[in-house]
Image (spheres, rainbow, N blue to C red):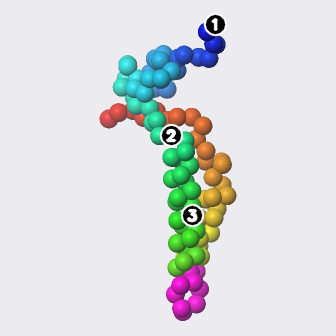
């Protein structure tokens, strides 16, 4: 019994039907970004956490009071982490080769 899962995908640039596993369009040579989702998430968390921890570190490590610029960075990092689900890329991206 064969499943009904689609075995093809469509190139967003030239609308050529491609094999579902194809990562390069056979017609226009567009390339599919196959960065795994966990890697995308790791990058995202890395940026957010880096900003948050780095900002907090620099905000209070300097003995001359609170460094507000660093606090702003920490807040941006925190917002990044909180907002992350909204940035989740559910679609893999196609890129046109130059
Ligand atoms: Zn194409």
Q: Position of residue 35 (x, y in %)?
A: 47, 40
* Quarter the C terminus occupies: top left
CA–CA distance in space, label 3 to label 2: 20 Å
Q: Which residue is mark 2?
A: 36
Query: Mark 2 or 1 closer to N-term?
Result: 1
Name the residue rendered at 62%, 69% in the picture: 75
In the image, residue 95 above or below residue 40: above
Residue 9 left/right relative to 78: left
Q: Position of residue 39 (x, y in %)?
A: 51, 46
Looking at the image, which is closer to me, 29 or 46? 46
Residue 73 appears anywhere in the view = no
What element does badge 3 sit on? Answer: helix
Looking at the image, which is closer to me, 76 or 33? 33
Name the residue rendered at 63%, 52% in the picture: 84
Q: Which residues are magenta?
A: 59-69
Which class describes the residues within 10 Å of circle 3: few (<14), some (14-19), or many (20+)? some
Q: Nearer the viewer, mark 3 or mark 1?
A: 1
Q: Which residue is mark 1?
A: 1
Q: Position of residue 64 (x, y in %)?
A: 54, 92
Looking at the image, which is closer to me, 46 or 80? 46
Residue lying at the far top of the rendered structure? 1
Name the residue rendered at 38%, 19% in the picture: 27
Residue lying at the far front of the rendered structure? 1
In the image, residue 40 above or below residue 16: below
Query: Mark 3 or 2 closer to N-term?
Result: 2
Q: Is mark 2 within 8 Å of ligand 1?
A: no
In the image, residue 66 above or below residue 6: below
Q: Which residue is mark 3?
A: 49
Residue lying at the far left of the rendered structure? 98
Query: Mark 3 or 1 closer to N-term?
Result: 1
């Amino acid at each position: 019994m064969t499943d009904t899962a689609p075995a093809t995908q469509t190139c967003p640039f030239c609308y050529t039907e491609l094999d579902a596993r194809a990562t390069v369009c056979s017609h226009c040579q567009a390339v599919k970004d196959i960065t795994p989702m966990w890697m995308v998430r790791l990058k995202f968390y890395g940026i957010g956490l880096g900003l948050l921890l780095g900002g907090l570190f620099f905000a209070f490590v300097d003995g001359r009071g609170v460094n507000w610029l660093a606090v702003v960075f920490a807040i941006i990092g925190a917002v990044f982490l909180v907002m992350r689900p909204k940035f989740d890329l559910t679609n893999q991206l196609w890129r046109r080769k130059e």
